[in-house]
Amino acid sequence: MKRTLLLTVSLLFSLLLTAAEVPQIGNIPGRRTVSLNGAWNYIVDVQEEGYYDYRMKPTPWGFFRNAKPQDPKDLIEYDFDKSAEMPIPSDWNTRDPRLFFYEGTVWFKKSFRFSPEKGRRTLLYFGAVNYDARVWVNGEEAGHHIGGFTPFNFDVTDLLREGDNFVIVKVDNKRHPEDVPTQIFDWWNYGGITRDVLLVDVAETYIENYSLQLDPKDPGKLHFSVRLDKALPGQRIRLRIPELGIDREAVTGADGTAVLDIPAKPVRWSPSHPKLYAVELSLGGETLRDDIGFRTIETRGRQILLNGEPIFLKGISMHEEKAFGGGRANSTADAATLLDWAKELGCNFVRLAHYPHNEYTVREAERRGILVWSEIPVYWTIAWENPDTYRNAAGQLKDMIARDHNRANVIIWSIANETPHSPQRDRFLGDLAQYAKALDDTRLISMAMEVTSASNYHNKLQDNMNEYVDVVSFNQYIGWYRDVDDAPKMTWEIPYEKPVIVSEFGGGAKAGLHGSKDERWTEEFQENLYLQNTAMLDKIEGLSGTTPWILKDFRSPRRVLDGIQDYYNRKGLVSDDGQKKKAFRVLQQWYKTK
Ligand code: GCB
């Protein structure tokens, strides 16, 4: 009885409180934020006892209530405040030895003090949570989000109160066939709150997002567009770029958006001169700052043109894993080590595989003059016919673009990796490619494809999706999944007048294992594979870049060979403890010739 009454009162109360996922807010580093990073309590919940009752119905008495006994007789079988702590952001697999292989639900709780300010709103922002996140603030639901690598935010203004507050997040990283990525993928399914958690302080009306870049059709102009969080006309947004002498005002129309075209001749951002301009956007006495670079990117026949000049993309693929050992990377320092290795290789380009990486990596790459390929985890065989899967993939694409569309170094949005040919897949990817263009028609679209062999030594790249992409990219593993001696015999036919990127090639080696070039897993085997492959690639007409697989050994549950793999994919040029393998030098030398 007591319970029922309590429940009715609390349900009534919750009707008065509202929270909602609101569109992703742009330029998080430029906002007024309070970090909720740090120690969070966590409870491992294998059977989701904290969410479902014993009939598998969601229970109103879930862990999100953070209940405490009111009477010594009360039965409450969890207590966040007595549970262990984990630093956030992180992944649970490397933070708790019991959770190394764990895929399931973990609950997290953070307490914090807060003081609401009249006329201000508060968004609760997550850089990423892998994979399924349900969020409550002070026991009330704030929202639900799926997708492990993109930011999301809830407006929690009405849920916060003066003084003590708490946020509880139920994170579930179980894999399902309809998910993006799907049930199988060659990387570690790191679970947890893997990126920053922030409270973002915004005005009642705020700048939700904006875009500022050279107009690709007329690079003598900057094109600026801005969107408020609501459809409010007559709002004045001041745009200043002091170094260019720009000080202009944009006034919103009925839909809460505004655009400006501004004649300007900024120094172009490029790998050799990664120039960024300080930009200020002001609305109602509040200023949002950013650092933005200006460049053009386009294709002409089989060439990629950066600022109108042909460029060869000397790239490397990388996963979002810490430089030393495994674990999700999420800091400027993590990004710096990985990107410095890429620089040492001679790279001007990285493929951030196979999902959007954290914002630190993209911004650090931009500062270092490293171009970026960014992709969504539409990987291998996903559920092409499931409309929810499509919505999920499209949502991740939209959020990836919304976060990084002002980064000068991001030049390619990739929408898929190694997908099998079928009419259903063609429909899915065709729609996704068109959606990507509709969201951002100023960058290049690609996807990593598979080679179709016309005969034993003749490779033809035949894929209906080539109609949609600006850059034709494919993965090939001659020397690893096929004999290395085939490399000199290979001929390539790419029947499209488009630039070509070899988005993967490579093979495994255990750092420190030496032997003959014919002995698999030795550094010499990998070294020879790189020598043969680079010589072969030199013969591909229209080759505009490569992103060999991969910068560093990375954890994968599919790589089980004891003593060699030990749950690491060993195709790295650098080992998981930072040793450079012999093939590193081969690629470095080859890039000197490009
Ligand atoms: C691929 C995949 C990549 C794998 C790699 C491998 O083609 O795109 O995710 O890790 O091969 O090592 O087999």
Image (cartoon, helix red, strand yellow):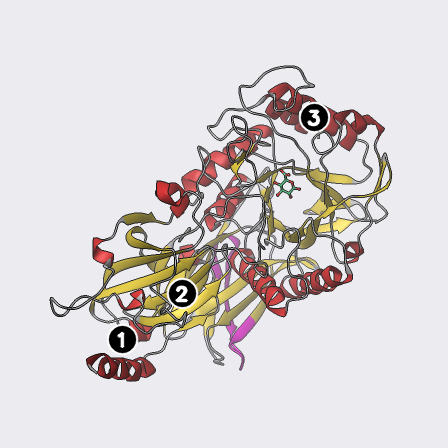
- Some atom of ligand 1 lies within 8 Å of the CB belonging to the residue at label 2: no
Q: Point out the tag, 3 or 2, that comes first from the N-terminus.
A: 2
Residue under pointer 3: 529
Above or below: residue 499 compared with residue 442: above
Badge 1 amino acid:
Lys
Nearer the observer, disc 3 or disc 1?
A: 3
Q: Are marks 3 and 1 in contact (CB under 8 Å)?
A: no
SS for dot 3:
helix
* Mark number, residue 118: 1
Could you give the CA–CA distance between mark 2 and mark 1, rounded to whole angstroms?
28 Å
* Quadrant of the snapshot with the C terminus: top right
Quadrant assignment, res 9: bottom left
* Quadrant of the snapshot with the N terminus: bottom left
Say whether residue 311 is visible. no
Badge 3 amino acid:
Leu
Residue under pointer 2: 134
SS for dot 2:
strand
